[in-house]
Each structure stands twice: as C-alpha cells, then as structure tokens.
Image (tube, rainbow, N blue to C red):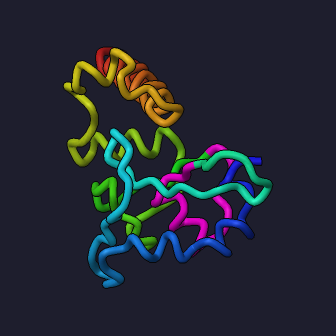
Amino acid sequence: MSLEDNIDHLLINQHLFWSRITSEDLEKCWSWDGNLAPTGYGRVYLKPSSGGPFQSILAHRYSWIIHFGPITSGLYICHSCNNRSCTNPLHLFEGTASDNFKDMHAKGRGISNPPIDYWKGKFHTEETRLRMSEVQLERRERERLERLEKQ
C-alpha cells in the first residue's frame, strides 16, 4: 500500500506536514520548509504504518489529502501559483496531465533547458523518472498541437 492510499496514517502524522509550513496566510503561498526533490517540489518522509523503510510523498499532494481527502485516481495536483514548493490548498487543483500541460504553457513554465545531470540519471529517483515521463508526454502533446495548427 502506498502512503497516499493510507489516508488514516497521513492524517495521524500531519504534524510532520504542519511543522514545515512557513505561513498559513490563505492569500499567500505556503512555502515548504523541508526537504525538496531535485524538481523543486516539497517532500515529506514517513515510516509506513505497516513498518519497513521510510517512504516519501510530495508535500503539495499531502496538503491536498489533508484538506480535501483522497486524490482522484490518475489525476495530478497542480499549482495555480506556479510555486512548486507551495502547499496552500487554495493554490492547488486536481487536473489531468493535459490540464497541467496547458496550465504550464499558458503561464510560460516548463523544462525547456533542464540541467544536463537531470537526463544523465544523477537524480533519477522514482519521482524524476515520473517527471521525465511527464516531459515526454508534454513534448508529444506540443508536437501534436503544432501538427494541428499546420493543418
């Protein structure tokens, strides 16, 4: 069972989340003051309730679960504020990969020139492998949109 599936365990341990929030002003970003993944997203480490090694969950996804409950299967938790370390639930929304892609490009974001080490595997965790898959999907979507525009 993944951490995200064990809602009770996440809720019992939410003090770990709240101890790393720098602001609770609803108008501002709640910047994560803990471990950051190489991609800039906050990361929370918890020992699973079943024992075993620590597992991580992205801080903005943890925030969503605390405030709104389980994440709909297959959906992303996207940032409306463009701040990857933000955990303010009012700055988050559920969306598909396509929604996230459109939002990212509408706001001029994205990895256009990633660090060389990013692709060489220096930071290849499950999280960066997932991000690389997202980048590949984004590139395919961008190429598809360009083909449609040419027609």
Q: Residue at x 50, y 39 (%)?
A: 97
**146 in the magenta segment:** no
Q: Where residue 28 sits: x, y (%)?
A: 27, 76
Quadrant the C terminus occupies: top left
Query: In the image, 82: left or right of 47?
Result: left
Q: Where residue 67 sits: x, y (%)?
A: 56, 75
Q: Where residue 81 sits: x, y (%)?
A: 29, 61
Q: Where residue 8 sits: x, y (%)?
A: 74, 70
As drawn, 134 above or below 68:
above
Q: Which residues are magenta?
A: 56-74
Spot the residue most to the bottom. Answer: 25
Query: In the image, 73: left or right of 61?
Result: right
Q: Nearer the viewer, residue 147 or 124?
A: 124
Q: Residue at x 27, y 32 (%)?
A: 111
**64 in the magenta segment:** yes
Q: Residue at x 49, y 36 (%)?
A: 127
Q: Nearer the viewer, residue 87 or 48?
A: 48
Query: In the image, 85: left or right of 109?
Result: right
